[in-house]
Structure formats: structure tokens, C-alpha cells
Image (cartoon, rainbow, N blue to C red):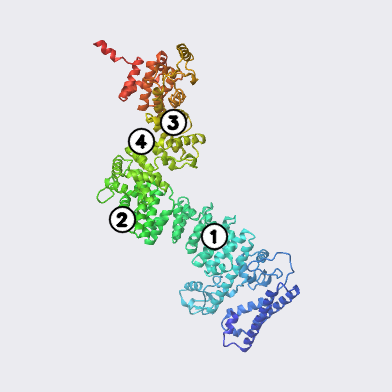
Amino acid sequence: MIIMELRTNYNTPTNTVEILQSLQKKVELAKSFTTKIEKNVHTMNSSEIITTVHQLEGLVKSFGENLNVIPLSTYGNQEYADKAAKSLSKEMKEASFSVAGPTSREIETDLYAVDADISAVNIQLSDYPSQTYSTPDYNNINSREISAVLDRNNLALPQLARYMEPLYETFYCPLTKTVMEDPVTIESGVTYERRAISDFFDKFEDQNELVCPKSGKSIKSRNLSTNVALKATIDEWKERNEAARIKVARAALSLASSDNMVLEAIDDLQSVCRTNPYNKVQIRSIGIIPLLTKFLEYRSRSIRQVTLELLKQLAEDDEEGKEIVAKTVDISTVIKMLSSSHTPVRHASASLLVELSKSRFFCNEIGAVAGGILMLTTVKYRQPLDSFASEKADEILKNLEKLPDNIKLMAENGYWEPLLTHLLEGNEEMKMEMAVYLGKIILGSESKTYVAERASPALIEMVKTGNSPSRNAAFKALQQISSHNPNAKALVDAGILQIMIEEIFTRSSTHNEEMSSRNEAALILANVLESGLDLENFQVTTHGHTLASDYIVYNIVSRIKNSTPDKLNINLIRILLCLIKSDKASSTIVSVVKEMEASYDLIDLINNPNEELGIKSIKLLITLAGFMGHTLSDRLCKTQGQPQSLIANPNEITTITEKHAVSANFLAKLPHQNLTLNLALVNSKTIQAVTTSIAQINKTGTRSSRHTSSYFEGLVGILVRLTTTLYDHQILLTAKTHNFASLLTELLTRSFTDEVQKLSAIGLENLSRHSVALSRPPQRKKKNKILKLSFFRKCISINLSKDESTFSLCPVHRGVCSSQETFCLIEAEAVERLLSCLDHENVEVVEAALSALSTLLEDKVDVDKSVGFLSERNAVRHVLNVVKEHKEEGVTKKAFWVIERFLMKGGDDSVSDISRDRLLPATLVSAFHHGEGSTREMAGKILRHLNKMPDLSNTLTFTK
């Protein structure tokens, strides 16, 4: 600066010009020496280096001599320039360089490394003449040299930088003793800090009392003249000093030999940034940010904290700075610090993320950080634990909303407010994008209802008034919302039913869009109805039609056909399955189906290639079977390929599917007494496939597929349906051929479902009712009378020998019986298994077992023998236990009937066993008072048998 000022002075004496020209030449020569060393340092030997360094030392001293001979008049009234030149001259004349010998230490290869063979420079500082400090050249500073200098001279980093850029006395204000920011010169020629001298002058009320604080001379004027030259010199010194401090700090951070060194370096960098924002650019340009990243992993919480704070400073007020920090720093590490147990670290990381979130680059990158937005949303909701971090997290999330993808990520992590806000308040494009996201995101259980309440009105409005892409996006979102049953009420309140009905029936648009919107509307309507809300009386048209009205049902049923798209068919059937659950709608649906003969269309859809459509069709047919079962049976038999196609060949089944299960159950649910269907099953050899499948499942169990149990129930139900029409010879022959009695007996106690046990008991009951008719006396060969009599007596004497070749007689059915030919429960060994079913928890199984056992106590069999047979197997105890455990009317009535038969035919032993039961009288009395007619009558009979009430019929006779 001094040389530049002098060279611009046109009144400079000739000798001064010559001095400056000499200095210029020496500067060029010095540059050549340094360039020579830089280029050839690895090839020069020690002697060459020493020679060059000594030459450089001579030049520096010569500089000092030249500066010293510049005439004082050259400086004019700029006293500070003279002093600065003299100070610099003194330092340069006393400069000394030395070269250290080679060492074995590793050469550092950081950005500002120097060769290990070159030592530090020894400079005596003019400001502190009594001390000599060993300081490196800050342009080529080495981190290890920094450590050595600091340790040797007991300096802090800022002090070291100051000595690298010498601070001259003229920079100090005589009043404040600090470096001047705004130097001004007063009348006495002394320069002060503007504010300091102004404050000093304000103390004098009398102008005549003004004095110069330093010289004590009286002055007449308060005028302050800005010392432009000194200010420029100070500013330039500050820049060099700050640059030196930055480089020293960088070297210290590279070394990081102690926590204190790191803390001092970072603190100095923060100070430099506060002093001059441009220093942030310098810090970024020399690669300090990559060095800082490693300190984010330090164990010292203080270092992590100040590192985060410095990174925040470097990112402030500069988009480029934000981007550099975001690219260099591991964002996931910063986000993890949001959960730090150390509050300052937590707050510093939150503040840094706030600053970075203002950058579009960061907004783009945050989505790639695993769990980043989840962590931010978690911190946001922890407001009571840390309000500062919560507020910062909220600010970060708001900044991230600039990118729609981030809004989606927030929603996926449970923070729905941004998406819903943009859906409600955004422009058309934004609303559509938010609706698209809403249709793709799986809603969490806690947010489903909230989202439905907020989003439904806007989405429905988009369906009503939006363009085609917006409508499609809204439909997808409404599908997602409606798939959660509890959302149905919010959707209904928002007017979903009316809009969906309009879309299905009356909306007109292009063909493709029309079919698509109908499919979507039907799906949404089906989802809403499946929620279980009572909506049959809800008005869905402007004409007052309700969902259960003929108009709505007719329009739905009329659209179910093969020509309708499969998805629409599926959802229309789903709607009917929901409506048919109500009494009013069910009668309407049945009436419309009968009138339109829609059952043919439903039966045709059974074998549709779309398996889901086939399943839905069968489910609706099963429901309709309870209202028009015989009609469906007849129409099924008239359809080509039916009913045999409903039961697949067991050899072709690899996995039992839902289609197999519902098909079998459809045949099982149709009216059992329908002879046409039963004969069709027999003639089509379907029964053979059924029994084979049952045998296979008996071996493998029902765990092979989640639909196996349901399929098995359907198969057993098909067999049971045949037992209701045994009066037909062909069906009777089939039951005998496949030994239904033994098959159903085996199923009674296998570990299958309750439904299988119930059906097996029902089937055995139906079979047992035919045993008396099927049981016949044995046909004897025509031999002499003596042989006949002898043979007959032998049969009697052996008391029903088990050898069927001797034609043993059944004690109950009074003839020759077998499980296969007469379906005898005794021969099938079903009695014990039926008795064990009486202990079942399921009352339906108990009632079915009681009904089957009751066939052995009917009047057409030998009741006395049957009671004796059952008594030997403790049947009374089982029946009494049924009365105690089950209070349902049907099972109680049947149990009372059995008990009454034992009291009538069982003799004293049965009466005694029944009388000893302590709970029975109370149960009988309760039934007598509160039971239905037949149950009450049965309870009265038992009470009279037990002498618990008078015989009213005898009393009437006596009265007469």
C-alpha cells in the first residue's frame, strides 16, 4: 500500500523514483527465487536450497534498506506512512531465514502443505520488539508447523494470525486502544476513531477548551476529516489478517490435535464470518466445509454444537452456500442429532436444518434421506418436551412443502396437514397432484378418519366439476378413503352417495371415460355400503329415490350381464350383497331378479374367466337361495355344464381356492329336498368327486389352504342334501354305494369345524329315519322245519351275534341291519360319537346330535330295547348335562323329550338317575313357567313323572 501510494505521487523527487524502481526489480527477483523453489523443491539438493534461501534473505534485507532511505518529505503530512515504512524497513533488515535438515516425518498433503525440508521463517515482530516468534508463511502453512508454533510461543490461533499479518501502531486509536474502523484526523493532525473522538469532544461545552487528547494541544475546530488512506490500509490489513486467520484455522482443523484447538479454530472462523460476510466465500473456497463434516461425528458434544453453528453461518444469506453445505454434509447425521440428549446440539442441528431447508437443492435431497421426514415429523409432535426444536421442525417442514414429493413423504409419515391444505387451497394442478398422492398412500389407522373428514368434500367437488385427469385422481383417492369402513359416515355426510349413483346411472361422457367412472363409482359405493351403515332409506336422487327403491335396484340388476365390464359387474354385485341384508331391499331385489330372470345371468357368470366375478356371482346366488332356492336349482340344472362344473375333479386340484369353496357351499345351500338337483348331482357323477375329495382332505387335513375348511363344509353339505331324498331309489342306491352312514360317523369326532360335525349329525338323523324301513327279517332257505327252528333259536341264543352271515337281528330295528345297507346307527357305531357331541360347546352341534339320537327313541322302533342300549352308555347323564349347560329353546325341548322317553320306558333305574339330578327340577319349573307351548308341556310331563306336580287329568276324573 505504501509503495502504491508513493508511485501515484507526481511530485515525488527523482531519488525516490529511483528507489522505487530498485524495489520493483528486487521484487521481481524475489519472485523468481520463490518460483524456483516451488518448481524444483523435489529435485534440488540441500545446498541449492540453502543458497537460494540466503539470496532471498539478502533481497529482503535490501528491501529494508531501500525503504529506510526514502526521504521524509516524500510522505508529506501522512505521518502514519512514514512510521509504517520505517517499521517495515526495520523488520525486513532484521529478517533471518534458515533451512532445516531432512526428517523422516511424513509430508502432509493438505491443501496448503509445504515440503518437509523447508523450515518455518523467523520473523521479529515490530510491535513486540522484545520477543521473537517462530511463524510460518501463511500462504503455505502446514498444520504441524502451526502446532509447533502455538506450543513454542504459547499463542492462541487469532494471535498467531495477527502476527502473520503484523499490526502497526498507527492502526490503533489513541483513545480506544483498538484498531480503528472509521479513522478521522482532527486539526492537530492526530487520527482517532470517529465515534471515540466525537464522544471526547462532546465533553467540552466551551469551544475554546477543546484540546487534542494525545498531544494536549488546543484546537479550534471540531472538524473531522476521514483519513481515507489509513482507512484503506486498515481495511486491506483486515482482509489479509482475516485470510490468514482462515488459513490458520484450516490448518488447525486438519491437525485437530486437541479439542481446544478445534474449538478455537471454529470460534475464530465464526468471528471472521461475523466480521465480514464475504469471508464465508473464502472459507468455502479453501475446503474447510469438508473438514467440518468429520467433527459432526466427534464424541465431544461441544465440538458438535459449534460445528453445527458454523455450518449454519456458512449457509446463511447465500443460496450457493446452502447448496455447498447440503452437498458436503451428511444430512442424515444432522437429522439424527435432532434426537440428541444434549439440548444445545439438538437446537443447533434444528437451526442448521432450518437454514438448509430454504435451499431447493436440500428440498430435493431430503427425500433420499432414510427416515429424514419421519424424524422431523416426530420432533414436531414433541412440542411439550422441546418447544424450540418442535417450532424449528415445523419451520423446516413448511420450507420442504415447496416440492410436492416432500408433501407426499410427509403424508406417508403421518403428517397429513400439508397435503390436505394444498388439496383444499391449491390451484387445479396442485389439487390434482395431491389427489393422486392420496390415492397411492396407504392410510394409517389413526389418520384414516381425519383424512376422510378433511378431504372428502374437496374430492367430491373435483368429481363433480373437474376435468378428466382431476376426476380420475379424485376417484382413486375416494377409493382409498372408502376402503376403510369407519370413513363411510364422513363420505356419506359429504354427499358421496348421490354423486356415485349419478355417475353409475346418468353421467354422460366419452365411452372410455364413462365406463371408467362407472367402475370407480360402483367400487366406492360398494365400499361405503359394506361399512354396515343403515342406508337403505337414504335418498340418492333428486326425485327422492332411496337405495332400496325399485328404480335403483332395477338399474343395478339390469346392468349385471356378460356384456358388462367385469369390474363393474363385480362392484354391482357387491352393492346387491349389501342391500339384500335388509328386509325391505331384499324383497325388492328378489322380486326384480325373478321378474327379469336375472338369475340366468348370474349363473352364466359363475364360469366367467374372471375368478373374482365368478366368486361374487356365487355369493349372491347363495344369498338368493334363501328366497328363491328351488327356482335357482331348476335354472342351474337347465344351464349347460351345470351343476357338475361347480365341483372340480379332485385330481386336478393343486390348491383349494375360494372359488372351490363357494361353489361347493352353493350346492350345499340350495334346498336339500330339490329332487331335480339331487338327481343331477347323482347322474353327473358329482357325488363320486365329492366323496373322493372328502377322503383326501380326511388324510391331509384342512390346513393346506385357508379355504379348505369352507370347501370341506360344502362337500359334506352336498352329501347331507342327498339324505333328504332317500325315497328316490337312485339316490338311495348312491347313499348305500358310498356308505354314507360310516362316512358321516367318521366325520363326527374328527377335528374339523363345528359346521362339519353339525352337518354329519343331521345326515345321520336323516339316514337313521330310514333304518326301520330298510331293516328286514332274514330270508331263510327252504329246509325242514326242525333245521329252521334250530337255526332261529341259535340266532336268538347267541344274542345278536356279530357275524352277519348268521343274520343277527338289530335289537332296535327288529331286523337285520348294517351301516351300509340300512344306515343303522348302532351298526355304524355312531351312538357313542353322538353322545360325545352332547358335550360340545356349540349348541347347534348339540341339538343336531340330540335329534339323531332321538331317532332311536321314536315309536316305530323298539323303544324299550333302545332305552336299555342307551342307558348302558350313560345317555341320561349326557342329556342332563345338556339341560344344565344350554338354555336355548330348541335344544331344551329336545332334551326334555329324551328325558321323558327314559322316564316312560326306562324303569326305576332311569327314574332314579333323573331324580338325583338337583338342578333339573329348577330348570323344569322355569321352563314350565316361561317356556313355549310344547316345551312347557314337556316340562309338565316330566314334573308329573317325578311327582313334582299333581296329575291334573286324574283330578278331573275324580271330580266327575
Q: Nearer the viewer, mark 3 or mark 1?
A: 3
* Front in this rendered view, residue 852 or 312: 852
Q: CA distance from mark 1 to mark 4?
A: 85 Å
Callout 3, which amino acid? Gln
Q: CA distance from mark 3 to mark 1?
A: 72 Å
Q: Nearer the viewer, mark 2 or mark 1?
A: 2
Residue located beneath label 3 in the image: 757
Q: CA distance from mark 3 to mark 4?
A: 27 Å
Callout 2, which amino acid? Arg
Residue located beneath label 2 in the image: 507
* Residue 272 falls left or right of residue 672: right
Q: From the top left corner, tell me how far across and down residue 832 is, in percent.
A: 46, 24
Whether the residues at callouts 1 and 4 have beta carbons within 8 Å, the answer is no
The mark that comes first in sequence, 3 or 1, is 1
Q: CA distance from mark 4 to mark 2?
A: 45 Å
Callout 1, which amino acid? Leu
Residue located beneath label 1 in the image: 308
